[in-house]
């Protein structure tokens, strides 16, 4: 059995159990989205890039959330502007149904979730912003996915991409669908490898950074990994966790802040902001 096969299932049962509890309650789902903004460092980086993008004058905006999961990105995006149209695509039908129900319950009608495979989704020049957060390592033909996103963006559209690195020690979980279980096809990416894939699709890279450096990794362990380990040992530890987080969260937040401002030379993840450049067609014709 490969290292990848061993690590992907380490906390899988606990994550599935927590996910089911969250999906059953609007209150717990709200609490999950709010707490993840503080606990999950990746969301700090994503929100930072979204805020930068949102400073531009955007009207009649269409956004693609490719591989939406629990809808964390859609929740944040829909909180910024009720006029933005957000299309969220995920392969897990149960999550899609739960998300549609939740967003309807909280009155956010500008978000729609659909079941589908992002490697097959192309909507020519339809979106101003596209996000793909930690799903690319599950897809064999990841180059095709990046090309599809490029085709689906309008000229001057922005692509936000987050992936684990090939050296990541974080747990990797399979994705459950109604038909099959999708296992990751790679642990992650090297920086040069990812840059080449994005550029080969036609994008111009505006920003790239390592996420979860030393400080971020400690924050993840304190706020997420160790509590999941506690749930693995005993489900009743869920009663103790709120008291644990009272003392541990301030520490994790400080570590997250440090990671955001540190220039990490390596890390558990990579984030890229890329642009579909609007070229001057007259100039291209003379080349």
Image: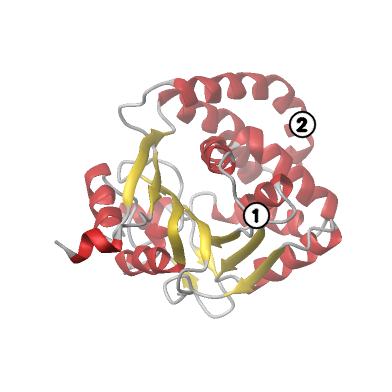
Please, what secondary structure does the residue beneath circle 1 have?
helix
For the question of whether residue 68 can be seen, the reply is no
Which residue is depicted at the point 23% across and 52% down?
A: 196
Q: How is the image coloured?
A: secondary structure
Q: CA distance from mark 1 to mark 2?
A: 26 Å
Tell me, for residue 74, which label it has, or none. 1
Task: Tell whether 42 sits left or right of 265.
Answer: right
Q: List x then y, in percent, for residue 154.
A: 46, 63
Q: Residue at x 30, y 54 (%)?
A: 198
Q: Residues within 10 Å of mark 2 (few under 14, many from 20)?
A: few
Query: Hey, which quadrant is residue 24 in on the image?
Result: bottom right
Crowd band around label 1 with a 10 angstrom C-alpha radius: few (<14), some (14–19), many (20+)? many
In the image: residue 110, left or right of residue 50: right
Question: In front of the other: label 1 or label 2?
Answer: 1
**Along the line of sight, the residue nearer the viewer: 66 or 125:** 125
Residue 239 visible, this angle: yes
Q: Position of residue 108 (x, y in %)?
A: 79, 58
- Name the residue carrying label 2: 242
> In the rendered view, does 27 fall on the left or right side of 79?
right
> Residue 43 at what x, y percent from top left?
57, 40
Of the pair 147 and 94, the residue shown nearer to us: 147
Asked if residue 143 lies left or right of residue 21, the reply is left
Q: Residue at x 34, y 63 (%)?
A: 185
**Closer to us: 224 or 86:** 86
Q: What secondary structure is marked by label 2?
A: helix
């Amino acid at each position: 059995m490969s290292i990848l096969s061993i690590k992907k299932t380490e906390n899988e049962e606990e994550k599935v159990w927590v996910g089911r509890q969250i999906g059953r309650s609007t209150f717990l789902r709200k609490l999950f989205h709010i707490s993840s903004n503080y606990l999950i460092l990746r969301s700090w980086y994503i929100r930072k890039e979204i805020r930068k993008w949102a400073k531009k004058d955007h009207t009649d905006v269409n956004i693609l959330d490719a591989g939406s999961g629990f809808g964390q990105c859609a929740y944040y995006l829909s909180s910024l502007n009720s006029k933005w149209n957000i299309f969220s695509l995920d392969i897990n039908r149960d999550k899609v149904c739960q998300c549609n129900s939740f967003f309807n319950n909280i009155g956010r009608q500008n978000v729609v979730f659909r079941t589908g495979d992002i490697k097959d989704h192309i909507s020519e020049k339809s979106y101003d912003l596209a996000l793909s957060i930690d799903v690319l390592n599950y897809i064999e033909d990841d180059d095709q996915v990046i090309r599809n996103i490029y085709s689906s963006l309008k000229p001057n559209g922005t692509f936000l991409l987050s992936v684990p690195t090939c050296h990541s020690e974080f747990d990797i979980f399979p994705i459950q669908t109604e038909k099959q279980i999708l296992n990751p096809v790679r642990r992650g990416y090297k920086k040069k490898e990812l840059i080449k894939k994005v550029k080969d699709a036609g994008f111009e890279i505006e920003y790239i950074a390592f996420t979860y450096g030393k400080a971020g990794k400690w924050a993840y362990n304190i706020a997420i990994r160790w509590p999941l380990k506690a749930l693995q040992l005993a489900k009743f530890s869920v009663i103790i966790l709120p008291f644990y987080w009272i003392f541990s969260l301030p520490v994790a937040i400080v570590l997250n802040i440090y990671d955001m401002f540190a220039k990490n030379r390596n890390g558990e993840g990579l984030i890229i902001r890329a642009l579909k450049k609007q070229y001057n067609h007259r100039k291209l014709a003379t080349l």
